[in-house]
C-alpha cells in the first residue's frame, strides 16, 4: 500500500508542478502584454486560464481519490492536504494574471502611456517567489519557504512605490487618470499574487515541519533569519 500511495503522490506532485509552470507563464505573459501593448499575449493568458481551471479540478479530484483510497496519516496526510491548498492558490494566481491581461487589452487600445518602471521589477520579484516556493515544495525545504514569506515585504514595497509614482503622474496628466488607474489595479493584482505565493510557502512549512506559521510572529522569533530554529 505504501508503494501505491507513493506512486499516487508522485503523480500529484507532477501534476502540481505542471500547473505551477503554466501559472508562472501567465504572469510573464500578462506583464509582457502590459509592457508591449500586446493584445495577442493578453488573449493567450485568458485562454490559458481555462486549461488551468480544468487542471485545478483534476488535481483536486485526484487528491480526494488518494484520501479515500489510502487514508494517509501524519506526513502523508500533510502532503496531500498541502497539494490541495497549493492547487487552489495557483488557480487564484492565474485568475489574477487574467485580470492584468484584461487591463493590458484595454490599455493597448488607448493612447500609449509609459509603464511604471517598477512594475517589471515587481513582476520579476513575484515570479521569483513563485519559483522558489515550488522548489521548496519539491525539495521539502522549509528554510527556503520562509525566505519566500519574507520576500513578500519587497513586493509590498514595490506596490507602495508604484502607487506613489502613479499618483504623481495623475497630477501631471489629469486627463489620463482613468488609464493610470489600470496601472494601479495591475500593481494591486501583482501584490495579491505575492500574497497567494506566501500562502503556498506557509503551507510547505506545514507540510515539512508540521508547524503552522500563518498569523504567527515567527519572523521576529527568528530575527529575519529563517535558518535559525524557532523556539517555543
Image (cartoon, rainbow, N blue to C red):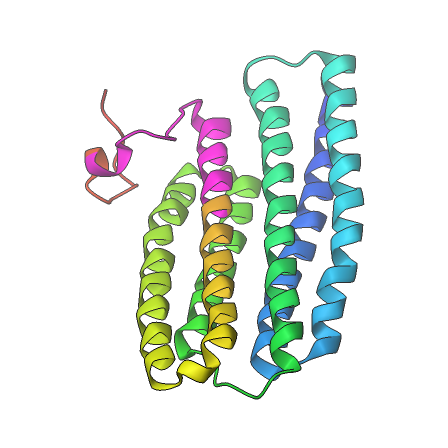
Quadrant of the rendered image containing residue 15: top right
Residue at point 65% right, 69% down?
Answer: 29
User: Where is residue 60 shown, x and y percent of the image?
Assistant: 73, 31
The image shows a total of numbered marks equal to 0
Q: Which residues are magenta?
A: 197-220
User: Where is residue 173 shown, x and y percent of the image?
Assistant: 40, 85
Residue at point 47% right, 81% down?
Answer: 176
Rendered view: 100 above or below 15: below
In magenta segment, residue 52? no
Rendered view: 196 above or below 109: above
In magenta segment, residue 217? yes
Which SS does the magenta portion mostly show? helix
Along the line of sight, which residue is nearer the eye, 190 or 149? 190
Q: As drawn, which residue projects farthest toward the bottom?
A: 112
Rendered view: 194 above or below 229: below
User: Where is residue 47 shown, x and y percent of the image?
Assistant: 79, 60
Residue at point 41% right, 45% down?
Answer: 144
Q: Is residue 7 visible?
A: no
176 sits left or right of 94 in the view: left
Quadrant where the image shows the N terminus:
top right
Along the line of sight, which residue is nearer the eye, 105 or 171? 171
Along the line of sight, which residue is nearer the eye, 4 or 204? 204
Quadrant where the image shows the C terminus:
top left
Quadrant of the rendered image containing residue 9: top right
User: Where is residue 140 shown, x and y percent of the image?
Assistant: 51, 37
Q: Is residue 157 visible?
A: yes
Q: As drawn, which residue projects farthest toward the front?
A: 175
Amino acid at each position: 500500500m505504501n508503494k501505491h500511495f507513493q506512486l499516487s503522490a508522485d503523480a500529484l506532485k507532477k501534476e502540481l508542478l505542471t500547473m505551477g509552470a503554466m501559472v508562472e507563464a501567465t504572469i510573464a505573459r500578462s506583464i509582457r502584454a502590459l509592457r508591449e501593448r500586446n493584445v495577442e499575449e493578453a488573449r493567450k493568458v485568458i485562454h490559458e486560464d481555462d486549461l488551468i481551471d480544468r487542471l485545478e479540478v483534476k488535481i483536486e479530484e485526484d487528491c480526494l481519490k488518494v484520501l479515500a483510497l489510502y487514508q494517509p496519516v501524519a506526513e502523508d496526510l500533510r502532503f496531500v492536504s498541502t497539494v490541495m491548498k497549493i492547487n487552489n492558490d495557483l488557480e487564484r494566481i492565474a485568475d489574477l494574471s487574467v485580470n492584468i491581461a484584461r487591463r493590458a487589452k484595454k490599455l493597448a487600445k488607448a493612447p500609449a502611456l509609459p509603464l511604471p518602471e517598477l512594475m517589471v521589477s515587481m513582476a520579476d520579484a513575484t515570479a521569483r517567489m513563485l519559483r522558489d516556493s515550488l522548489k521548496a515544495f519539491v525539495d521539502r525545504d522549509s528554510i527556503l519557504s520562509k525566505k519566500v514569506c519574507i520576500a513578500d515585504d519587497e513586493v509590498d514595497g514595490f506596490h507602495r512605490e508604484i502607487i506613489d509614482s502613479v499618483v504623481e503622474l495623475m497630477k501631471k496628466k489629469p486627463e489620463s487618470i482613468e488609464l493610470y488607474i489600470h496601472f494601479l489595479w495591475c500593481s494591486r493584482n501583482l501584490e495579491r499574487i505575492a500574497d497567494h505565493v506566501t500562502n503556498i510557502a506557509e503551507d510547505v512549512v506545514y507540510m515539512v515541519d508540521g508547524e503552522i506559521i500563518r498569523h504567527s510572529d515567527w519572523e521576529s522569533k527568528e530575527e529575519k533569519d529563517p535558518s535559525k530554529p524557532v523556539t517555543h
